[in-house]
Image (tube, grey):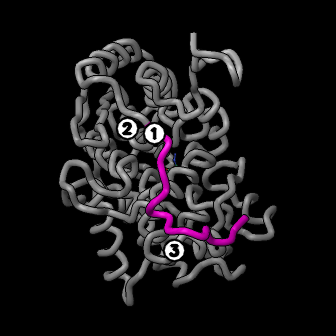
Amino acid sequence: MHESLPFDETDVRVSTGQLPSLLEVEQFLHEAYVHYRDDDGGAVADYIPALAEVDPSLFGACITGAAGLFTEVGDAHHPFSIQSVSKAFVFALVCDALGHMEVLDKVGVNGTGLPFNSVMAIELNDDRTMNPMVNAGAMATTSLVPGETVEAKWAYVQDGLSRFAGRRLEVDEDVYASETATNLRNQGIAHLLDGYGRMYADPDESTDIYTRQCSLLVTAHDLAVMGATLANGGINPVTGERAVSTPTCKRVLAVLATAGLYERSGEWLYEIGIPGKSGVSGGIVAIAPGKGAIGVFSPKLDEAGNSVRGQKLVKNLSQRLGLNLFASAPTGFTGALAEPN
Ligand code: DON
C-alpha cells in the first residue's frame, strides 16, 4: 500500500471537471447567501477570549475558480484569524518540504473521530499523533517546519501561507496574545507528544509558532484563493505563483476529506462530498479539485467548532455547482454491449 508508484506522479491523469459559468456561480452564491443570512444557530467560540468579541452577525463568502475568476458576497473582506484552517496549509508546506511518506510516518493521516483538542486521541492510539488536522498532529506538523531558528521557521510558515493567499498575511496581535495567555491545553498536548517522541522540535517553541499561524488574519476571499491554489495543482490561480508541488495537493485534500471537520468529517463528506477545513473563528474552506474553492466566514459554531452558516452554505453550493466528488449521472448505456440511448 505504501510503496512508491513505478512512474512519475506528476504525469498522472486527473478526474475532475469545471465549474458552471461565472454568471451561474454568482447567482447560486447570492441565492445561498440570502437563504442562510438570517440563520441564527450556533454560538461564537469563547475559549480564546479575543474570539468572543466578534460580531456574530458577520457572514461573507467567496468562490474562486481554478482559473482565478472569483465572485463574492456579504462580508467577504472582513478579516478574522485563520485558526485551524491554517493546519491544512502548514501541512501542505511540510508535506512538500519533507515528502508525503515522511509525514505519513511522523504524523499520520487517519481520522481520530474525536474533538480537535482531544488528549484521549493521543492516549488511545499507539502512534500518538493521528493526523495533521487536529491540534496534536498540527503541532507535530508545525514542529517539522524547516528552519534553524524559531524566526526562520515562522518566516517559512508566514511566507508559505502568504503564497497561498497571494498577499502578505499578518498576525492579529490581540488574538495571538489572547491565545498565548490561555493555551495551557495545547502546551500540555505538545509536552505529552514530546514525551512520546512525536514532537520534532522544542514543544514550547512549536506551540508558539502554531499559535502564531492560527492568529494570521485572512478573509473569506483569501480562503477561497488559498483553497483554489490546492484545487489548481499548487499554483495560485490569481498570482501564478507556485505555493506547493502538484502531488502534494492531492495528499492534503485526502487528509481534509477524512479529518477536516473533526468528528463531523464523515457527516460532512456524506452530505457535501468535497474536502474542507474549518476553524473556530468561523472560517471554512471547501475545495473542489480542478474546479476551485469556496471560502466562507460566519462566526457562530456548532458543538464541534464548525461554522453553522458556513456548513449550510457549502452544502447548498456543492449540490448546485456539481462539486460532490462522489456524484455521477447515468451514462445512458444500459449494458456493456448496448448502443447509447
Ligand atoms: O488551537 C486552538 O485551539 C485554536 N488555535 C484553533 C482551533 C480551531 O480552530 C478548531 N476548529 N474548529
Q: Nearer the viewer, mark 3 or mark 1?
A: 1
The residue where tag 3 is placed is: 99
197 or 191: which is nearer to us?
Answer: 197
Residue at coordinates 51% horizontally, 48% vertically from top-left? 47
> Is 289 covered by the magenta stretch?
no
Which labelled disc corresponds to residue 16? Answer: 1
Q: Position of residue 290 (x, y in %)?
A: 40, 43
Circles 1 and 2, Cβ within 8 Å, touching? The answer is yes
Picture quadrant of residue 22: top left
The percent position of residue 170, horizontal first and vertical second, equals 24, 60
Q: Please give the residue where the numbered disc 2 appears in the rendered image.
A: 291
**What whole-number distance in Å separates the C-alpha atoms at marks 1 and 2?**
7 Å
Give the total of numbered labels.
Answer: 3
SS state under label 1: loop
Q: Would residue 222 be seen by someone viewing this image from the given angle? A: yes
Q: Percent from the top left, x then y, of residue 266?
A: 67, 37
Q: Amino acid at mark 1?
A: Thr
Residue range highlighted in magenta: 1-16
In the rendered image, the vertical position of residue 220 relative to residue 311, given as above or below:
below
